[in-house]
Image (cartoon, rainbow, N blue to C red):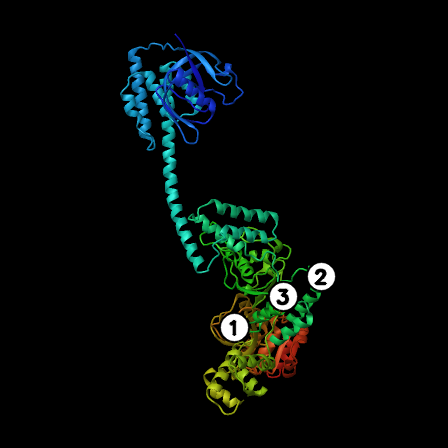
Amino acid sequence: MDYSLLVMLLKDLVILPFQEIKLELKDEISKRIIKVSNKKYNDRVLIVSPKVSNDDQSIDDLPKVGVVAYIKNKIELSNGNLRVTLRGEKRVKVILYKAFTNEILFSNFADIILPKFEPNGEEVIKRKLKDTLMNYISSSKSVSNSIVKTIEDNADLGFLTDAITSFLPLTLEKKQAYMMELNSEKRALSLIKDIKIEIQYNELEEKIDNNVEVRLTKEQESYYLKEKLKEIESSLDLIDSEESDIDKYYALLNNLHLASKTYNKLKNEIDKLKRISSSSPEYGVITNYLDIVLNLPWNNSSEEVLNVKTVINCLNKSHYGLDDVKKRIEDYINIKNINPDILNPVICLVGPPGVGKTTITKSIAEALNREFYKISVGGLNDASELIGNRRTYLGALPGKIMQGINKCGTNNPVILIDEVDKMVKDYKGDPASILLDVLDVNQNKSFIDNYIEEPFDLSHTLFILTANSIDTIPYTLYDRLEIINLNSYTVFEKVDIAKKYILPKIYEEFKMTKKLVMKDDTLIYLINNYTKEAGVRNLTRILKTLVTRVITSKKESLTITNEDIKKYLKDELYENKLASINTTGVVNGLAYTNYGGSVIRVEAAMYNGEEKVLTTGQLGDVLKESVEVASSFIKESDYVSSTSFYNRTIHIHLLEGSIKKEGPSCGVAITTAILSKLLDIKVSEEVAFTGEITLKGSILEVGGLKEKLIAAYNAGIKKVYIPEDNANDLLNIPKQIIDNLEIKLVNNYNVIYNDLFKENNVA
């Protein structure tokens, strides 16, 4: 039988049999359809859901299946809209669409004859569909179980599939497909499949929700604590609450003028910081990294003073002598004024402790108006101390070089690398090889610290190194260094330093309005009897002690005499004179150590026994060989009888046995001590020797002559034998030393033998 009803097109909405929907109609066409259906068609209307949601579709494009809906109720709202409740009754087959008016469609339709199913098969499908639906409901906490009662009270498969379809959160296309499908068995099988998919979605969603919930709980707690901390800090005016850390990092980065690769690397680090939780351990690692790297002085330089007169005057005010260092700085400034882009020299100051290596470097920084930073590498054996650790290590930091640059706040400081001769090479690495990258002017423009990971220009930095001895400077570094020797001070130089530098600083430190009066002879007495050093470090300490004791004793006269020194420094007394020599086989040798020159006693003993040579006094291998050479030279010479060594043991000992001794320059002194013992002729305590001896008696050049002669003078030596090859070194010896020492140049031991032994030798 054919039926006729007005057609209501529901765009983006599907109604199924036995489903109720509520609509709020705004357009006049829909309102008119409801009104006419109420009057003429017993509150019935044909609902059709077009597949294409647009206004240009034709009648032929409309579906051939619709749903007859009952207008359950309607309410006219105050805003003019019409609220209606529609209930789907049955599917029908549309035979014809035609115009009711220009804007309203009319349709002819017929009932659909549904296929018959085998009862047992239908029951199995219904049971399977219900079980699957129950699994779906139980798989999600958010799904209502309101449909359960509905499907239990009805046994019709068609009703069951339509009720479940309207209940499930299916897409519009899916619901349209179910509405168009006339075979309820096919709808049921398809529903079973779709419900299982929904179950899988629910399980996955629940898993994700659980993970997100845990993460959110931690993040919310962290966020709450951070926000609370910010509020507290903001209340205390500790931070600007309106500016985040991320914004600060971006602002710092944009204010720097960096190479594009470095800029992009740091920007990526900030971007990464935005994406991770503040409670993540990586957050702290990145913030620490950015705090250091973004605050490095990439482009910040001190304005250097390049006026030669100003710089040299500044150095002269702070340091006595050290002319070689001052001249080198003067040359540097002159060249810098000609070519501002000239590479900085790498200077190494070599000299004993206390001569002013560290303090002159600090004064150079002040004179040039540069920042100063000191790095001590004495005993350093871990290369990472200089070049830093990778960020993957716990507690990683930049190396000492970049730490110094960071603390100075400029990229052109003066950096002192102290005690470079005392670095250690072992399984932890070779610090000297790392220093090559730092000091080499051709490489340090792109120095990369392991922590910073980006190239930093160190070519503007002035590096000055210090060492006590050239011999122990690592060979890999030595070739790159400009060596400047800082020699020991003479007693007269120490007097000038005490008067012009040490005492004025002590008076200023103690805020003394009245100054002590000390004559030069008194200062010489104090230096000779209370100090034993190449520099003035101990002299400064002694003078501080003296001034302190004088001003606290309320001494009436401010004039200090030798007797006053004995009174106030009686516990500081050090006898700097050598003991007299009263026996044979004892002579004075001159040595050069890391602490300056020194006079050392060489003793020779001889007794019957096995024919051999013994050595004591912590002699090194080279010094032991000098003993062997001296012994062989004497045996071959005609100075003594050829039987003098038969069945006799020679024992050579160098005093101050707790100190290790090394080097060939004691060969002449050892030869003289052995001959003195063999010939039984005493050598005066006012004579000293230095020089390397060969098997044929030649005397070779030695080092450290200035320090040795100063030590000889300070010890009261009157005559010194030195190698003739050292004649040019005498040009650098202070005039006071030359005037007060008899210096004799020799190239062969025969000269010494003739002076000391020939006339007295009756062998």
Residue 137, given in percent of the width and then of the height, sits at 32, 28
Which SS class for mark 2?
A: loop
Upstream in sequence: badge 1 or badge 2: 2
**Are there few (<14), some (14-19), or many (20+) residues within 10 Å of tag 3?**
some
Question: Label 1 is placed on what type of residue?
Answer: Tyr
What residue is disc 1 on? 646
Labels 1, 2: front one: 2
Q: Quadrant of the C terminus?
A: bottom right
Q: Position of residue 686 (x, y in %)?
A: 58, 83
Mark on residue 483? 3
**Is 95 or 671 nearer to us in this picture?**
95
Q: Is residue 2 above or below residue 705?
A: above
Q: Is residue 638 visible?
A: no
Element marked by disc 3: strand
Q: Position of residue 629 (x, y in %)?
A: 57, 69
Q: In the rendered structure, are the residues bearing label 3 and label 2 in contact, judged by CB atoms less than 8 Å apart?
A: no
> Which residue is situated farthest in the right direction here?
338
Which residue is tagged 2?
Answer: 339
Spatial CA distance of label 3 from label 2 is 23 Å
What residue type is disc 2 on? Asn
Q: Nearer the viewer, residue 389 or 214?
A: 214
Q: CA distance from mark 3 to mark 1?
A: 49 Å
Q: Is residue 456 among what the camera can see?
A: yes
Q: Nearer the viewer, residue 195 or 171?
A: 171
Question: N-terminal of the two: label 3 or label 2?
Answer: 2
| Mark 1 Cα-neighbour bin, 10 Å: few <14, some 14–19, many ≥20 | few
Residue 257, placed above or below residue 363: above
Q: Is residue 142 above or below residue 319?
A: above
- Quarter of the image for the N terminus: give it: top left
